[in-house]
Amino acid sequence: MINLSSSDYFSMKIGFAYNIYENARRIEPHNHDYFEFFTILSGKAIHVKNGETEIIQPGTICFIRPDDLHSFSSAPNSTFKILNIMYSTEVIKKYFHFLDINISDLPSSTFITQDKLNIIWDNVKKITSVADPNETIFLNRSLLSIIIHNYLFFEQIAAPHDMPIWLTNLLYDMQKKENFIEGMPAMLKLSKKSHGHICKSFLKYFGYSPIDYINTLRLNYAEFLLTNSNFSILDIAFESGFNNTGHFIKKFKAKYTYTPSVYRKINS
């Protein structure tokens, strides 16, 4: 068994690295002291993690925790290309703490669409093209946000088993920045439902209004910017979709206990 260390791949200040393995046939059993997301870009692979075997192919994204023992081998008459995204334990634990989510809640694997994989890959390429370390840190945190919100957050919200497919798709689409920034007009366009029908559906399945959901997405994004950027409070408010700074501060304090400026000082 091979034991891999974060110090072999990235500085602790950056807390991020990635690898691509092309034309791979086998990756020996190993574990590591960092967290890892990986996805198959082409081909098929047999993945063994902690004694459990699964076939993974393009569209499968997997989450590996420190000390998970795993390996890969190619399917018969095949090779595979794999994208491996690594984050330090410190970065992951801090991010999950901010989201108030248990790391154990993250599923071991799931399927995402090709357009989401393209977004992840485009952001990886963007990170590697930047020379400024501070901008690199911000971009790799942004990538983590994209991965988590498409990989975990949507799964949790979609819990009601009898929820109609249009509402499932709406929740998914509203997590895109351009949609939660636009707010209710985006919901109406995406769902092709009336305002009243959307409101009734949210109350039925979640117990809160669609505006509450939109504000939650905006506040989550604002909190991420507060702790991962040097943007001013005013800029963060507008960047997150709030047109009134006073309203933003009031909503933020209601959710996070502190005003944005105090929250930033506490978590800087």
Image (cartoon, rainbow, N blue to C red):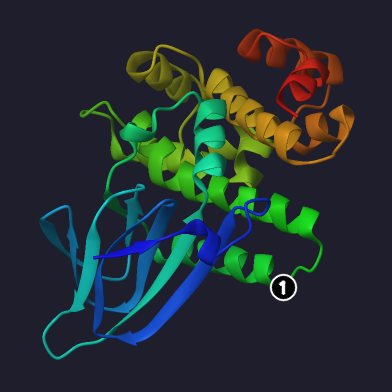
Near-viewer residue (210 or 84)? 84
Residue 139 location, x and y as percent?
68, 55
Residue at 64%, 32% (x, y): give it. Answer: 183
User: On screen, 101 above or below 230?
Assistant: above
Dividing the picture into quadrants, the one containing residue 135 is bottom right
From the image, tell me which residue sits under label 1.
129
Q: Is residue 71 left or right of residue 125?
A: left
SS under mark 1: loop
Residue 18 location, x and y as percent?
52, 67
Quarter holding the N terminus?
bottom left
As shown in the figure, which amino acid type bears the numbered disc 1?
A: Ser
Residue at 45%, 33% (x, y): give it. Answer: 193
- Is residue 189 visible from the viewing direction of this image? no
Near-viewer residue (60 or 127)? 127
Near-viewer residue (86 or 143)? 86
Residue at 11%, 55% (x, y): give it. Answer: 51
Quarter holding the C terminus?
top right
